[in-house]
Image (tube, helix red, strand yellow):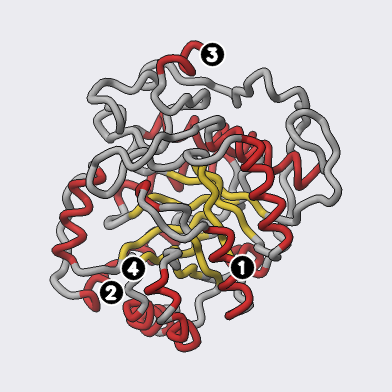
Amino acid sequence: MKALKRCPKRVLNGPCGGMKNDGRCEIADAECVFLKNYPSELVLDPGFREKLVIKPRKPFTKLLSKVKEKTAWIAEMPPRFDVVKRIDLLRKVKPDALGIPDNPLGTLHIEASSFAAYLKNKTNAELMVHVTCRDLNRLALKSRILGLHLIKAEHVLALTGDHLSMGGERYSTGVFDLDSMRLIYLTRLLSDYGVDEMGKKIEEKPRLQVGAGLNPYIPLEIEASRISRKLEAGAEFFVTQLVFEKDPVENVLRKILELRENVPVFVSFLLYEPERIRKLLKLMGIPAVELPETVEKLAEKYLEVFAELRKIGVPLGVYVSTLGKLEYLRIWGEHFAHSV
């Protein structure tokens, strides 16, 4: 529990996914407190009076069932009003699910579950809604989970959350009552057992499959520990941070095969203007990579990377972000359709 006092995000199950590839904290210009001393098992705080075993479940959504057998892809839909105006483009690309981030990069967006309800009404697509610990305490997080069940969202991606805004400045004060692993475990308690962390019964079990983030840029030994603990907490799928080449993620996928061979992983690709991507890479602390000069060529490169990664044997899907430029989803959809 000492790390709780020293970690700026109050993380117990560190390091968080925001740790830089050189081991520095994303907030303070100092070494992450978990870099050389991280837990080997899931850590719960004293507020978790209910401690039950979380067992693997068979997939019960179309997305996770499909990715076990075939290739599936998710289109990210940033919850913004300009995205709402172009939602008709989805009818032409037909992704397997829609991903809704939760105030991504710590910047103001429409509240994610409200946007998810809007998308469900407009498209009836399966949804993967991000829920971050940054902005909500555990009571609000439980309320959010129940709300997502009410609107018939199918998947929750449990994340600790970005601390900084796009400009690198503090946008607001983070809450961080939980970290992603405790949120995964709490969601599975609600979904599997119909109780919260205090053992209090809830009226109806939320039917949600629970996912976790995966950071291929963290040292492999550390990320393997994070994956193992997230599986212990109840993670049923993973979504990587943005990937531009196969090398960072290849060894992580092989490690997942060792831990649990049938866990689906969705590889995240950013389809956007290459010059803007280079600036974003620098901001996020991701090592620079060679990128083609057009969006079309970038889609081709991603599909080549994905084809190589599929050979490893992990059930693999794709998570495509366009930072709200939905017209680029059409480019991806056309290339993807001809590749599988």
Q: Residue 322, which numbered label?
A: 4
Task: Identify the amino acid type marked 3.
Answer: Met
Disc 2/disc 4 C-alpha distance (Å)? 15 Å
Q: Marks 1 and 3: CB-CB under 8 Å?
A: no
Q: Nearer the viewer, mark 2 or mark 4?
A: 4
Instruction: Say which residue label 2 marks.
Output: 300
Query: For numbered disc 1, what is the local secondary structure?
Result: helix
Query: First in sequence: mark 1 or mark 4?
Result: 1
Tell me, yes or no, whether the two marked residues, 3 and 2, touch with CB atoms within 8 Å.
no
Closer to the camera, 60 or 134? 134
- Between the C-alphas of marks 1 and 3, the distance is 38 Å
Q: Position of residue 331 (x, y in %)?
A: 33, 81
Labels 3 and 4 touching (C-beta < 8 A): no
Q: Secondary structure at mark 3?
A: loop
Q: How many angstroms separate mark 2 from mark 1 (CA)? A: 33 Å
Task: From the image, tell me which residue sits under label 3.
Answer: 1
Label 1, label 4: how many angstroms apart (C-alpha)?
A: 21 Å
Amino acid residing under circle 1 = Ala
Q: Amino acid at mark 2?
A: Glu
Q: CA separation, marks 3 and 4?
A: 39 Å
* Left-right relation of 196 to 170: right
